[in-house]
Image (spheres, grey):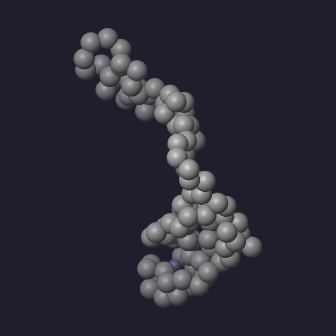
Amino acid sequence: MKLPKTKKKYCKYCKKHTEHKISVVKGKERGGLKHGSIQRAKKRGLGTGFGNKGKWGSKPALSKFKMTGAKISKKTNLKFTCSKCKKSTLQKKGFRAKKTLFE
Ligand SMILES: [Zn+2]
């Protein structure tokens, strides 16, 4: 679906309508556990018995991320950044689209 790059929208920080830049929110990369959080995860696993029972690894098992079902579209997750105060808000409700393109 084609979307405009900018849109006039109400900004709750400026309390008036301003130009907003639209962008897609991207999720975090896999293996995001870094040194500090790995240590914390290990400590959490120390409670009972040996090891951490396979929990709190850096990457989840691939099998858990298998796509099932018939859906080929995904809901959009858009971010609106105010051009005046540079603060951003997320869209309230996503809509289904195969692709999100900006004109
Ligand atoms: Zn603003």
Q: Closer to the camera, 60 or 75?
A: 75
Q: Quadrant of residue 52?
A: top left
Residue located at (25% from left, 17% from top): 48
Res. 6 image quadrant: bottom right
- For this orientation, the residue located farthest to the front is 70
**Percent from the top left, x then y, of residue 58?**
50, 29
Q: Position of residue 41 (x, y in %)?
A: 38, 28
Position in image of residue 2 (x %, y %): 70, 71
Q: Is residue 35 left or right of residue 8?
A: left
Point 56% across, 50% down: residue: 70
Q: Which residue is found at the position 25% from the left and 20% from the top?
A: 47
Task: Depth check: give the residue in front, 37 or 61.
Answer: 61
Would you say 99 lies left or right of 44 here?
Answer: right
Quadrant where the N terminus sits is bottom right
Identify the residue at the far left of this view: 48
- Quarter that holds the C terminus: bottom right
Q: Is residue 45 above or below residue 73?
A: above
Q: Is residue 34 visible?
A: no
Q: Is residue 89 above or below residue 8?
A: above
Q: Is residue 82 visible?
A: yes
Give the quarter of the image for residue 9: bottom right
